[in-house]
Structure formats: structure tokens, C-alpha cells
Image: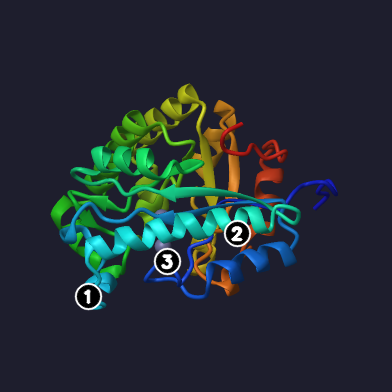
Amino acid sequence: MSLSKDTQLVSVHGGHSGEFCQHATDSLEALVKTYIQKGFTWVGLTEHMPPVNDAFRYPDEVAADLSAKHLYDRFAAFIRTARRLKARHANEIQLLVGMETETYCGTIDWINTLVDTFEPDYLVGSVHHVYDLNFDFDADAYRQTMRHAGNPAQLYCDYFDCQLQMIEALRPAVIGHFDLIRIFDPNYRQHLQLPTVREKFMRNLEKIKQFDLILDLNTRALYKGADEPYISRPILEEARRLGIAVVPGDDSHSVATVGYGIAEAIARLHRLGFDTNWRRPGT
Ligand SMILES: [Zn+2]
Ligand SMILES: [Zn+2]
């Protein structure tokens, strides 16, 4: 691998911390210090948005008896803390303070309210729900969402339709883990090649190109044992062909996962001929 010496370590989607996210660990500052130690140039701290109401809490938030109000206050604290860290460590790393979205009934108005209130540097537009059902929390959640869809082709198509609506409504600077819907599907390669599914993701890629948005090459899949990051290879090749900017994101949820798989993601993008002068959100 002959990477140019000045290929920068960056993460367009990262910094979930135990301080502000129920399924993460460690303090946000501990994560930031690890990014600095590892030599990252810039990192987006993109914490999950708070739920619109109690019904859309994640199972671990329900188990911990955290209300939507509490999660909102915790998100406000995240924004304050992230801005403080951004200023405190400005000489060592460039931090961006972002927010990762949800996509379910009622989110668009809620996200617009959050954006007006907290003015994040940018949004990572993600889809973790189809039919208002979360599918990525665990394999059981995935099975239930699949059961609702009836079959994989339907689930994948409906996922990409949700994603398109989100893209058109929000135009987020970054699209998070574009094909997350494959998460618990051992046969995803085959399902992504179904003509109906392919048509949907091509349509979304073309919209992303038209709006000039960035795709997150998300290495959390590698951490969870997959042999390629989100976005999977055939989709990544189409993104390359369309000239869409793709930037690594570690989606870190702890000190231990800071930078996990980033070198591999960079090598992959380099091999496929992507521009490795990473585009930063907002530029
Ligand atoms: Zn998370
Ligand atoms: Zn996500």
C-alpha cells in the first residue's frame, strides 16, 4: 500500500461517549484525547439526537428509566461539553460538533427544532428505523422489522425509501452508514444485487451526488465482525463512478474504538481510486 504521507486521519462520524450515549462508554474528553494521541487531524463529534418522545427511546434507555426529557437535557449537555472541548483542544485537533439523526415518524420537525436550538456544525443523516421500528439495536430487533416487511427485498427497498425522504427533507452534510440495513443479514450481498433494491440505492446515490453530500465509510461494521465497512463494495464502486465524496468515520463508542478500522478504510478508498484529500463537512 503506497499511501501518501499526508493522507490525514479523520473521522466524519465519531465520538459517541458513555457520558452522553447509553450504549457507549468513557467520557467525551477521554475519546478526544485518544484522537489527539492517535494523530487525527479533524473529527466530528456526532452524538445521537434525543428522541422526539418516550415511545422512541432505545431499549437500554427504557431499561435505565431515562425519559425523553432527560435525554434532551443530556444532549444539551453534550453540545456544551463538545464546544468546550473544541475550544480547549483547538491547537491539537480540529473538532466539529455535530448530531446524528434518527428517521421515523415526526423526526423532521423535531430535527429542525433541535438544529434551531443547538446549531450543530453539521448533521449525519442516519436511518435506524423502518416502519417506525428500530432494526439495528440487536438481532431480535432486526428480525421483528424483517417480519413486518415480509421479505428482505421489501425491507431493503423500504429502508432506502426512508433514507431518500430523510435526504430530501434535511440535506444532511453527511449520510451515515449508507447500507446499515444489511447489519444482521448474512445474505446481504445477494440482497443488495436484487434489481428492485439496486434501483433504490442508485436513486439515492444520484440524489446524494445532486445535493453534493458526503458519504460516511463507517468502520463500526468491522468492529462488529463484518469483513467490509458500511458502505459495501458494489455500492462504493457506484459512488466512485458518480464522483461522490466518501470520508472515513469510525463511529467510535469508547476509547477502545477510537480510530478502529480507519487505516483499513483509508486503504480501501485509496485502492478504489477515491480522493483521499478528505472533504470536511461545511466545505
Ligand atoms: Zn450509537
Ligand atoms: Zn448510526
Rendered-image quarter of ligand 1: bottom left
Alpha-carbon distance for marks 2 and 3?
Answer: 14 Å
Give the percent coordinates (x, y) of residue 271: 70, 45
Q: Are the residues tagged 2 and 1 within 8 Å (C-beta)?
A: no
Q: Residue at x 34, y 44 (%)?
A: 114
Which amino acid, mark 3?
Phe
Question: In the figure, 140 relative to 247: above or below?
Answer: below
| Residue at the limit of the structure toward the top, as seen here | 210
What's the mark number on residue 20? Answer: 3
Residue 115 position, x and y percent, is: 38, 40
- Furthest-bottom residue in this view: 64
Q: Which mark is residue 65?
A: 1
Residue toward you, 3 or 55: 55
Indicate the position of residue 180 as horizontal and vertical percent values. Answer: 39, 52
For the residue marked with disc 2, what is the amino acid?
Leu
Label 1 to label 3: alpha-carbon separation? 15 Å
Query: Above or below — where is 17 with respect to 6?
Result: below
Which of 239 and 211 lies nearest the eye of the viewer? 211
